[in-house]
Every structure is written in C-alpha cells, then in structure tokens.
Amino acid sequence: MSDQAEDLFYIAEQFAADARIVDIRELGNGNINDTFLVTLDAGTEKHFILQRINTRVFVNAELVMHNMRIATEHMRSRLYLKTSVKARRWEIPSVLLTPDGRAHLRGSDGSFWRGLSFIEGCRSFDTIKDERHAEEVGYALGMFHTLLSDLPAETLADTLEGFHITPEYLRHYDEVLARRSAPGSPEIHRCTRFVKDRYAWAHVLEDAKKEGRLRLRPIHGDPKVDNIMIDEATGRAAGIVDLDTVKPGLVHYDIGDCLRSGCNPSGEETMKWEGVLFDTDICRAIFRGYLADARRFLTEDDFAYLYDAVRLIAFELGLRFFTDFLEGDVYFKVKQPEHNLARALVQFRLVESIESQEAAIRKIIRDLR
Ligand code: GN1
Ligand code: MG
C-alpha cells in the first residue's frame, strides 16, 4: 500500500466504528472536494462517504459542519410531521463521528476530513434519463425546501460569502480581465462579448432582493442532478446530498441551478458546446415535481422571478468557469488546459437556448402555478 493509500485507510477507519473496511474508491466528479465511497463488511455490505473538504474554498470548514448539523436536525424533525412522506422513502445524510466523538478529523498535513452516511440502494446520474427522473429531481428539491421552509435563514451561517451573488462574480471578473494581457482566441472573444451583453441584466435577482421582493431562506446551494439520490428499486428520489453549501440564500439560486443542470441533456462536461440545448420537456417535468410541495410557500414575487433564475444561474456558472479559466484555474478542478473555457462555452450556449425559448418557459411556469 502506498503512503497515501495507507493514510486514506487510516482516516476512513476513524469513521468506521468497529467495522472492517473492504474497499475505498473515488466517487463522483466533484469540482471542489474529494469524495470516496468506503465499503464495510458489517454482516451485510454497508457503505459510507468519506470526504476531504477543499479548505481553500471552504475556509471555515467547521462552520460548514455546523450548518449541516442545524439543517439536517431540522429536516429530520420536520420529516416526522410531513404526512405525505410517510408513503415514500426519504433519507437525510447524517454526520459520522470519530471514536472521540468529533464530526471531523484533521490529517497530518492539515487536511479536513469528514464521514457521512450513504443512502443505500441508491445512485445518482450526471444527466436526466427521462421525464419521470426529471420529476423526481424536482420533487427532491421541493422536498428539501419544504422541510427547511420554517427554519429562519439567519440560524445558518454564511459559509461561502458571495456564493451565487452574480454582481460579485462580475466584479471579480472585471478585475481578472483588467489584469490580463494575453491575446484572446475566438472562444475568449465570444465569452467576453457574451458577458458584456448581459452585464446589466445579471443584477436582476440581487436587485429584487434589495427591493424586498425576494427574501433569504435556507438553500442547498448546489442541487444539480448528480446530487439527487435515486432509489434503484423504485426509481424515486430518496434524498439529496452534498450539503456543504447549505446556507442563507434565494431559493431561486437552487431552482436555477437544478434546471440549468437537469435540462441540458448533453451534460455540463460535454466538449461539443455548439450542440447544447435547454430541453423544455424536462423543464416542465422538473417544475411539476418541484411545485408539488413548494407551491405552498412560494409567493407571487417568487413566481415572477423563476424564469430569470433559470437564465441567470446558467449565465453565472458560465461566468464563474470563464473567470477561473482567465485566472489560471484556481477554483474548479480541471482535467485539461482549457477545461474551464470549454465548460463556460457550454453554459453560455445553454443560456442562449433558454433565451430563445423564453415564452415557452414562462408558459410552463404559468401553467403549473
Ligand atoms: C461545484 O464540486 P461540486 O461539483 O459539488 C460548485 C457549484 C457548481 C458546480 C458545477 C462550492 O460543485 O457551485 O455549480 O461545481 N461548488 C462550489 O458543476 O463552488
Ligand atoms: Mg457541491
């Protein structure tokens, strides 16, 4: 065993209680943290999730754990009261403790590790398979928002300042662009032009927040398709994972993120950005699933900004990828030199597809209201 594998094994053991570890493998393709699936031999096969938190992004990882505890405890208490859930499986990840009762462990190099329960018998997907899957993805987000809808947003800490505040990403983009002297390729020109043309509009949600039309609530922060766990036996959503970005925010960030991820059948990692499209049938199915519960707590103003949310979060993610490319890939993990540029082109093409179908998307929202 290499030193690194031995360290990983040792760290995993601290969250395994007394069970024997039979396998550790990397899981998913997170852009920030490193995630591992640990298999235990505990009579029957059992798993848990081991994660190394990227502390360059989550500078206060203890506070991330604090938010996770508050949110999961609240959701668990509400789950008992929600009669419609009784008939379906719904699980909330729990934080595993080390033998000395702590929710995280520091590696000898200062790295931050934590263990989480795994939702057994489930898997997640990078893209949506069909409309039934889409409806389940929407349902999962609606369930999440509903279970947290009576938790005052201020009970959660702001663990990632500026997260999903588009004007702040624009400000940072301006700084990075001003520092840059390298000549631009046609793709870079396409992206700078794209941002310029939407610069003023991109303040839309933050302006609505300032005007008091939209208010802060507890949000997930990253409800993309591969964070929704689907029960393999029933095909139904059984939970939502990746709770690092749970914090106060606008539910619009979540709705926009879920749709920009779900309605792009090519997936956000495709290298063929010209073929990217926003699929309105999937959009309708996600909204149908989402609104089944969430309709009850959304206001008239909330509904009025749903279209902008879908358009904005795709734009914002494109802007974040593009800025990171210009800055030399300091935030998102990359697998090749122009990876972040390729990702930006995908999101920007998706925005164009959303814009060209504005009337249809607004109609979907109106019809489901
Ligand atoms: C990051 O690491 P991952 O994949 O869970 C990012 C999200 C982006 C997503 C795009 C903290 O999430 O905001 O939408 O990549 N998370 C953070 O795939 O910035
Ligand atoms: Mg995430």
Image (spheres, rainbow, N blue to C red):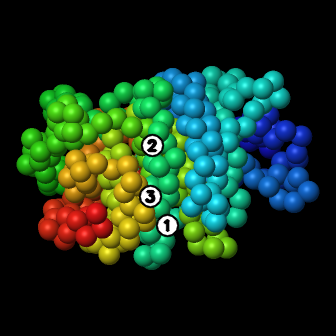
User: Compared to 208, does 256 lie above or below?
Assistant: below
Q: Residue at x 34, y 59 (%)?
A: 259
Q: Residue at x 44, y 51 (%)?
A: 223
Taking 270 as reference, is 187 left or right?
left
Q: Quadrant of residue 311?
A: bottom left
The disc, 1 or 3, on the residue closer to the chain's N-terminal end is 1
Binning the other alpha carbons within 10 Å of mark 1 as few (below 14), some (14 to 19) or many (20 upward) gives: many
- Mark 1 or 2: in front is 2
Give the spatial CA distance, label 1 vs label 3. 12 Å
Amino acid residing under circle 1 = Glu
Taking 281 as reference, is 154 left or right?
right
Q: Give the residue number, with chain letter if any, for mark 3.
A: 293
Give the spatial CA distance, label 3 vs label 2. 11 Å
Binning the other alpha carbons within 10 Å of mark 2 as few (below 14), some (14 to 19) or many (20 upward) gives: some
Q: Is mark 3 within 8 Å of ligand 2?
A: no
- Mark 1 or 3: in front is 3
Which dot marks residue 83? none
x%, y% of residue 47? 75, 53
